[in-house]
Image: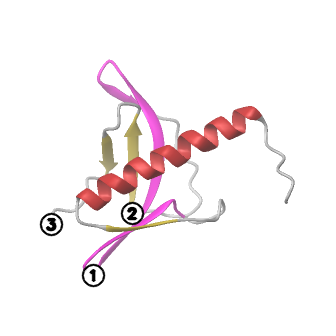
């Protein structure tokens, strides 16, 4: 077994991030995309979504909504991405920019 040197705070943040990625993945699948999730913590994006010939790199951010406004820390850009998925605590997902229109 490999030793894991994480603090309780890091585990909590990691869990929240993982949950947000799974919520965004489900939303993308409901929009007709095939979804591939990064296994490496050093990957250039969190998700890759594919629908027909269209392939999108997605960065996922867990965030909150305060007074109708989305509050999110600025993204830690590892590499250029096509979209940012903002996952609100209540399960809603917003994309910046919006996802392209398509058949789903």
**Of the residues under marks 3 and 1, which one precedes in the sequence?**
1
Q: Name the residue under label 3.
A: 102
**Of the residues under marks 3 and 2, which one precedes in the sequence?**
2
Position of residue 101 measured from the top left corner of the image (x, y, whole percent): 16, 62
Q: Name the residue under label 1.
A: 53
Q: Label 3 to label 1, Cα distance in Å?
A: 12 Å
Q: In which quarter of the image is residue 42?
A: bottom right
Coloration mode: secondary structure
Residue ID at (33%, 26%) = 69
91 above or below 82? above
**Of the residues under marks 2 and 1, which one precedes in the sequence?**
1
Mark 2 or 1, which is nearer the eye?
1
In which quadrant of the rendered image does the C terminus lie? bottom left
Residue at the front extreme?
1
Q: Where residue 82 is drawn, which disc sits there?
A: 2
Residue at the bottom extreme?
53
Neighbor class of circle 1 (other Cα within 10 Å; few <14, some 14-19, many 20+) is: few
Label 2 element class: loop
Position of residue 71 measured from the top left corner of the image (x, y, whole percent): 43, 30
Q: In which quarter of the image is residue 9?
A: top right
Neighbor class of circle 2 (other Cα within 10 Å; few <14, some 14-19, many 20+) is: some
Query: Answer yes or no: do the residues labelled 2 and 1 have beta carbons within 8 Å?
Result: no
Task: Give the residues drawn in magenta, as a range.
Answer: 45-71
6 above or below 49? above
Residue ID at (56%, 55%) = 77
């Amino acid at each position: 077994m490999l030793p894991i040197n994480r603090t309780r705070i890091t585990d909590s943040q990691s869990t929240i991030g993982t949950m947000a990625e799974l919520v965004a993945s489900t939303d993308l699948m409901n929009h007709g995309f095939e979804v591939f999730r990064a296994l490496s913590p050093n990957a250039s994006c969190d998700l890759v979504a594919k629908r027909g010939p269209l392939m999108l790199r997605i960065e996922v951010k867990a965030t909150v909504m305060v007074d109708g406004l989305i509050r999110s820390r600025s993204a830690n850009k590892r590499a250029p991405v096509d979209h940012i998925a903002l996952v609100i605590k209540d399960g809603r997902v917003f994309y910046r920019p919006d996802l392209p229109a398509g058949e789903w």
